[in-house]
C-alpha cells in the first residue's frame, strides 16, 4: 500500500447542537501535518466526539471550517474513516467478507478484493482468521477486523473515538502499539479521542488537551518519544506526569480561560506546541 497522509486545517470551528443548546465548543483551531498522530484528550462531555464527527463529515458544524489538503470536508468519504468503541461487524459474514465489504459495495472484482483483504489482515496480524466467523473472535480481534475493514479503503486519515476503552488492559496495549505503528508504516494521519492519559502518551505525536464549557483546545503537547513506547520507560513516565499536570491545571482553570499555547482572548491559538520527550535532548 502506498504511503499517504493529509494536511489537516481546522479553523475557528464552532458547534452547538441546536439554538437552545449551549455551545459545545468554540473556535477550535488545529493544524496537523501529513502523517501526524494527534490524540485529543479531555473529560467526558467536553465535546471530543462531536469534534471528531465533524472532522469525519458525519455531523454538521455551526461555523468555521475543516479542510483536508485544502479541501473543505462536507460529508463522509473513504479517504477518512472512523473507528468506534464497538466494532460494528456483520455477524453473518466471515472475517474476510467483513473486511472486504466496502470494496464489494464499490464493485471491485473478487480477485482484487481478495488481494487487498489479505494485505489488510496481515497489517492487523489476523491472516489466519480470514475464514473464521466474527462471533468466534475475541473483542480485541473484532476491533482488529474493524481496523482492517477501515484500512482496505486506503484512507489518508483514520479517526478513532475511544476505540479501545471496552478492551482488557493487555489487548488494549497491543492495539495501541499496533495502530500507531500501522499509521506510521502507511504514513496516514491519526486523530484519536480518549480520556486515558496513558493512551495519549503511548500513541500521540501531539496530545491536544480539550477542556472547558464550551470546550477549547487548551494545550498542545508534542510527544517526542521513540517507538515502540513502553509504559515503564522513564521518558514515557515523565511525559505522562507532564500531561497529567496539564490536564489537572486545565480542569481547575476558571471556565473560559486557558493555559498552554492558546491565547484566552478568543483569538485563534498560536499552535506552537510544547515539547517533551527525549529527542530534544539528543
Ligand atoms: N445529539 C446531541 N444533542 C444534544 N447535545 C448533545 C448531543 N450529543 C452530545 N451532546 C452534548 O454535547 C456535549 C459534548 O458531547 P460529546 O462530544 O459526546 O463529548 P465527549 O465525547 O467529550 O464526551 C455534552 O454536553 C453532550 O451532552
Ligand atoms: Mg465521546
Image (cartoon, rainbow, N blue to C red):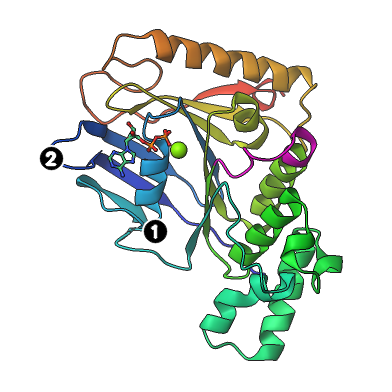
Q: Which residue is mark 2?
A: 19
Q: Which residues are magenta?
A: 162-172
- Badge 1 crowding class, 10 Å Cα cut-off, few under 14, some 14 to 19, many 20 or more, is some
Foreground of the two, 164 or 75: 164
Is residue 117 shown above or below 41?
A: below
Tag of residue 256: none
Foreground of the two, 260 or 84: 84
Is residue 3 shown above or below 18?
A: below
Image quarter for ligand 2 equals: top left
Which residue occupies 73% across, 82% down?
Answer: 114
What element does badge 2 sit on?
loop
Q: CA distance from mark 1 to mark 2?
A: 31 Å
Location of residue 49 (image quadrant): top left
Residue 43, percent from left and from top: 45, 25
Residue 3 visible at all? no
In the rendered structure, the answer to whether residue 214 lies left or right of residue 178 reads: left
Observer-side mark, 1 or 2, equals 2
The kind of secondary structure the magenta stretch mainly shows is loop
Tag of residue 69: 1
Q: Is residue 196 magenta?
A: no
Foreground of the two, 58 or 39: 58
What element does badge 1 sit on?
loop
Of pointers 1 and 2, the one earlier in the residue sequence: 2
Which residue occupies 76% across, 74% down?
Answer: 118
Is residue 277 shown above or below 55?
A: above
Q: Are marks 1 and 2 in contact (CB under 8 Å)?
A: no
Amino acid at each position: 500500500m502506498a504511503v499517504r497522509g493529509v494536511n489537516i486545517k481546522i479553523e475557528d470551528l464552532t458547534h452547538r447542537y441546536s439554538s437552545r443548546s449551549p455551545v459545545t465548543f468554540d473556535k477550535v483551531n488545529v493544524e496537523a501535518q501529513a502523517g501526524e498522530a494527534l490524540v485529543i484528550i479531555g473529560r467526558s462531555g467536553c465535546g471530543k466526539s462531536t469534534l471528531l464527527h465533524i472532522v469525519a463529515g458525519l455531523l454538521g458544524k455551526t461555523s468555521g471550517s475543516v479542510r483536508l489538503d485544502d479541501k473543505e470536508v462536507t460529508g463522509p468519504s473513504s479517504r477518512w474513516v472512523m473507528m468506534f468503541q464497538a466494532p460494528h461487524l456483520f455477524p453473518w459474514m466471515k472475517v474476510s467478507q467483513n473486511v472486504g465489504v466496502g470494496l464489494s459495495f464499490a464493485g471491485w472484482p473478487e480477485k482484487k478484493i481478495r488481494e487487498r483483504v489479505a494485505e489488510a489482515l496481515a497489517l492487523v496480524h489476523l491472516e489466519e482468521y480470514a475464514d473464521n466467523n466474527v462471533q468466534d473472535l475475541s473483542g480485541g480481534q473484532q476491533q482488529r477486523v474493524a481496523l482492517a475493514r477501515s484500512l482496505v479503503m486506503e484512507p489518508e486519515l483514520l479517526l478513532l473515538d475511544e476505540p479501545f476503552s471496552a478492551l482488557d488492559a493487555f489487548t488494549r496495549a497491543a492495539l495501541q502499539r499496533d495502530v500507531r505503528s500501522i499509521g506510521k508504516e502507511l504514513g496516514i494521519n491519526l486523530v484519536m479521542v480518549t480520556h486515558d492519559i496513558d493512551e495519549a502518551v503511548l500513541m500521540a505525536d501531539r496530545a491536544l488537551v480539550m477542556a472547558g464549557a464550551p470546550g477549547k483546545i487548551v494545550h498542545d503537547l508534542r510527544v517526542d518519544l521513540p517507538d515502540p513506547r513502553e509504559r515503564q520507560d522513564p521518558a514515557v513516565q515523565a511525559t505522562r506526569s507532564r500531561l497529567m499536570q496539564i490536564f489537572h491545571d486545565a480542569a481547575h482553570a476558571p471556565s473560559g480561560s486557558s493555559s498552554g499555547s492558546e491565547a484566552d482572548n478568543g483569538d485563534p491559538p498560536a499552535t506552537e506546541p510544547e515539547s517533551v520527550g527525549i529527542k530534544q535532548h539528543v
